[in-house]
Image (cartoon, helix red, strand yellow):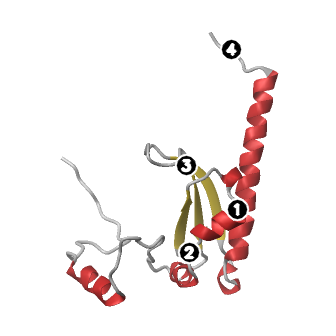
Amino acid sequence: MFMPKSEAEQHKLRVVEQARREGYARVEVWVTEALPAELRRGVVISVQEVSCSDPECCPIDTAVAILFASGGRGLIGIPLEAKNITKDTLMEHFPTIPVLTAWSCGEDAEWPPYEDSDMDEEEKEQEIQQRPKLRFGVGQNVICRVG
């Protein structure tokens, strides 16, 4: 049997949704402010909460996508609901200027950096060169048949 929500339940849902939207808006403003002025032009910020099924993890994370006019993009993950994010928390998870610049140019940049990586830049480059060659170019469209 269909049981519509009571007025109190509907009001509670509206309040929760309003808090989420306000959190999204706050995070968007803070991200825009934190971007260097030369990278802000044409940037689009998208904030979403995502469920995490990992029992060792926060049940709801906030994902912040930064889409640059050049086509480059980057993603920041914060292990909190949007309404609970403070400016200080955001800045703890915010990428460095070299990473933001690489993203704005459409380049891959590692963020957050691997904590267990003790390799210097030369060792990292050697490791990358030892990887097998890709069969197709990155971004290339291919026809895939499974049979």
Asked whether the beta carbons under mark 4 and mark 3 sit within 8 Å of each other, the answer is: no
The secondary structure type at the circle numbered 1 is helix
The secondary structure type at the circle numbered 2 is loop
Asked whether the beta carbons under mark 1 and mark 2 sit within 8 Å of each other, the answer is: no
- The amino acid beneath tag 3 is Val
Q: Which of 45 and 98 is in front in this view?
A: 98
The numbered mark, 1 or 2, whose residue comes first in the sequence reads 1
Q: Which of marks 2 and 4 is in front?
A: 2
Tell me how far mark 4 sits from mark 3, CA to CA: 28 Å
Where is 18 relative to 31, above or below? above
Residue 115 in picture, x, y percent from top left: 41, 71
**Residue at the (48%, 72%) spot, across then down:** 111
Residue assigned mark 4: 3
| Disc sitting over residue 134 in the figure | none
Query: Left or right of 127: which side holds 67?
Result: right
Q: Which residue lies furthest to the bottom in this view?
A: 122
The numbered mark, 2 or 4, whose residue comes first in the sequence reads 4
Classed neighbour count for the residue bearing mark 1: other residues with Cα under 10 Å, few (<14), some (14–19), many (≥20): many
The numbered mark, 3 or 1, whose residue comes first in the sequence reads 1
Residue assigned mark 2: 95
**Residue at the (18%, 47%) spot, across then down:** 147
The N terminus lies in which quarter of the figure?
top right
The numbered mark, 4 or 3, whose residue comes first in the sequence reads 4
Q: Nearer the viewer, mark 1 or mark 4?
A: 1
Classed neighbour count for the residue bearing mark 2: other residues with Cα under 10 Å, few (<14), some (14–19), many (≥20): many
Residue 45 in picture, x, y percent from top left: 65, 66
Residue assigned mark 3: 50
The numbered mark, 2 or 3, whose residue comes first in the sequence reads 3
| Disc sitting over residue 27 in the figure | 1
- The amino acid beneath tag 1 is Val
